[in-house]
Amino acid sequence: MSERVKHGYDEWVKGVPAAITEDVLWKVEAYRLSLFISDICWLDVTKLMHDKRTLDLSDQLYRATDSIGANIAEGYSRSTGKDRARFYEYALGSARESRDWYYKARHILGEEVAMHRINYVTQIIRLLVTMIPQQRSDGTIRESGPDYAISLDSLLYHIPLP
């Protein structure tokens, strides 16, 4: 896994099982990106676990990061837009929680790694903020859409490792 992650998103995709990539859910960009950050996070928490001060942080970070994709998958499978929006909101909360934990982990992971992860998760947040109102009949979200100006391509192909 670490070799595929180290070489970027395209190389990582080659290792994702067909059972996942052939599912209609794979078309959802936020889902694909959330799976990739889960694998990246595995490497990050492995480093964080070596420092007793960040043992609990590593557990929380991994749970939050994994919850992003899990909630997108569950929401996508719901029959009503209202239900889909609710699970996408859970994913949004998990993404923001992940971003928070990555900020706190910067002391061990290093500034470059932490900022990469923060910016990457921010891209997932941007997508979710767009997806949620699309699922509601009134097209609303409880916040205004933020402007995230970081290029996703730079985050997919330059992955600093801890």
Image (cartoon, helix red, strand yellow):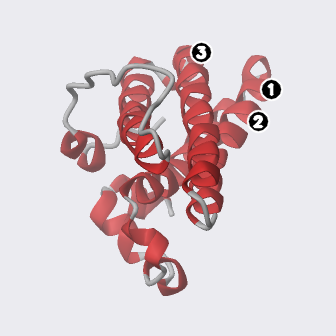
Alpha-carbon distance for marks 2 and 1? Answer: 5 Å
- Vertical relation: 124 (above or below) 79: above
- Residue drawn at point x = 62 percent, y = 66 percent: 79
Taking depth in this image into account, of 5 and 18 the one nearest to the observer is: 18
For the residues labelled 2 and 3, the Cα–Cα distance comes to: 13 Å
Report x, y in % for residue 40: 50, 48
Q: Are marks 2 and 1 in contact (CB under 8 Å)?
A: yes
Residue found at x 29% / y 48%: 156
From the image, tell me which residue sits under label 3. Answer: 104
Residue at point 63%, 43% (across, down):
86
Give the amino acid at mark 3: Lys
Q: Are marks 3 and 1 in contact (CB under 8 Å)?
A: no
Q: Position of residue 92 (x, y in %)?
A: 55, 35
* Residue identifier under label 2: 59
The image's mark for residue 26 is none
Q: Is 59 rendered above or below residue 73?
A: above
* Amino acid type, residue under disc 2 in the picture: Asp
* Element on which disc 3 rests: helix
User: Is 79 positioned to the left or the right of 141 in the image?
Assistant: right
The answer to which quarter of the image holds residue 119 is top left
Q: Residues within 10 Å of mark 3 (few under 14, many from 20)?
A: some
Sooner in the amino-acid sequence: mark 2 or mark 3:
2
Residue 48 % position (x, y) = 66, 30
Of the two numbered discs 3 and 1 on the same chain, state the one appearing first in sequence: 1
The residue wearing badge 1 is 56
